[in-house]
Image: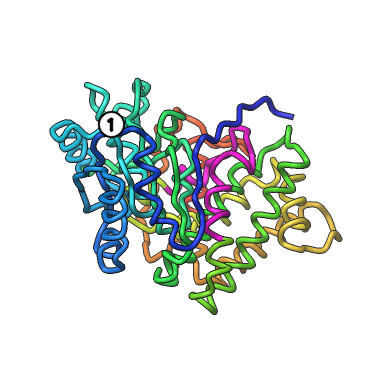
Amino acid sequence: MFNFTYYTPTKVVFGRDAEAQTGTLVRAQGCNKVLIHYGGGSVIRSGLLDRVKASLDQAGVTYTQLGGVVPNPRLSLVYQGIELVRREGVDFILAVGGGSVIDSAKAIAYGAVDEGDVWDLYDHTRQAVGCLPLGAVLTIAAAGSEMSNSSVITKDEGGVKRGYNSDLCRPKFAVMNPDLTTTLPPYQTASGCTDILMHTMERYFTPDGNMEITDSIAEGLLRTVMKNALILRDDPKNCDARAEVMWASSLSHNGLTGSSQGDWATHGLEHELGGMFDVTHGAGLAAVWGSWARYVYQDCLHRFVRFATHVMGVADSGSPEDIALRGIEAMEDFFRSIHMPTCLSELGITPTQEQLETMARMCSAAAGGAKGAAKVLREADMLSIYQMANH
């Protein structure tokens, strides 16, 4: 077993019309003024932003707002948010959107109470000293940021994408209405399901110390998400499937499916793809996962065998290596079945050798030289995986 600390302080309000409770939830935080942070036009067109504002008005909560968050949220908007929060005397941040919006809100919350440059946290040159409280009204099931201690920000200059983890940023509450996700395009739904799977698999593929109860939770979550991703492929309005995926999104990234350090190499590799090419996060993860898995599986063979038999339904016959490889192939077949890429060309990019080398160098630097638990990867290993995926 591993030693671990499990901490999940976020209150969850889940179900139809849950956003109507937003004002009451914010009021209970004892705040004076709220920053409503959101992305583009979808929360406006759907009427969600107006419903959230009406709930705040009814609760007597004053607010200002800042929209404009994009996928792979930008540091430049974070800086704008920090300045706005300080100027307006904001003491609570409400993220209305998906993982990108919540991540941006977390970065603003850090920067609002810190006189230094908030990018220093994501560049890992110092640690957070505090964080404004925040809450979330979730519109996309994917990142799990609504219950996690993590956020990822992209620096505009150079497209450098970096993550930072601290329990200080865990939201005080998360409002989850699965109906809000029914208008997502199929690609976004599939990308979100992929991200959920990856958050669980990053914790699952560790060489030792795993607990049976945690493994069973992780395997059940993986099977559930895969089942419902296929339902949503064929029936995007299926609210029961939307609910299963939304709750899985939170559970996959709040520590429940694995409280160890985890592997996180696939995420590290994707962050460089996202920074350089601005690809959709879940799709980028799918594009490199198979190459990563084939590169590392022999160093974590028993876990890949268990994954193949317990999650992917592979017959327990043949050599362990054969079973593991069939499990990897089955997962790639699943990605294809929901129209996710399994290589970089299917992702729509064809990096040059120089770009691959740059990404490997930056991935290694971001990890402090090495990353991974299934197999410890260094720059040369990362380059090999990128090269395997680049077909």
Residue 6 horizontal side relative to residue 122, left or right: right
Query: 74 or 133, which lies in front?
Result: 133
User: Quadrant of the rendered structure where residue 122 is?
Assistant: top left
Tag 1: Cα neighbours inside 10 Å, few (<14), some, or many (≥20)? many
Q: Is 28 drawn above or below residue 17 in the view shown? A: above
Q: Residue at x 26, y 43 (%)?
A: 61
What colour-coding does the image apply?
rainbow
Q: Is 359 drawn above or below residue 197 in the view shown? A: above
Q: Residue at x 21, y 44 (%)?
A: 63
Q: Residue at x 34, y 38 (%)?
A: 106
Point out the stretch of residues depicted in magenta.
245-270
Residue 198 horizontal side relative to residue 297, left or right: left
User: Quadrant of the rendered structure where residue 4 is?
Assistant: top right
Answer whether residue 353 is visible to the viewer in this image: yes
Assess whether residue 247 is covered by the magenta stretch.
Answer: yes
User: Where is residue 40 drawn, in percent x and y?
Assistant: 25, 60
Query: 213 or 314, which lies in front?
Result: 213
Assess whether residue 130 is covered by the magenta stretch.
Answer: no
User: Where is residue 249 drawn, in percent x and y?
Assistant: 53, 53
Q: What element carries label 1?
A: helix
User: Where is residue 91 drawn, in percent x and y?
Assistant: 27, 32
User: Where is residue 154 drawn, in percent x and y?
Assistant: 30, 43
Residue 190 horizontal side relative to residue 45, left or right: right
- Considering every residue shown, the one lying at the far left of the view is 87
Instruction: List the residue tagged with mark 1.
Output: 119
Image quarter (top left, top right, bottom left or bottom right) of the N terminus: top right
Query: 153 or 385, which lies in front?
Result: 153
Answer whether residue 354 is visible to the viewer in this image: no
Q: Is 165 drawn above or below residue 142 in the view shown? A: above
Three-letter residue code for mark 1: Trp
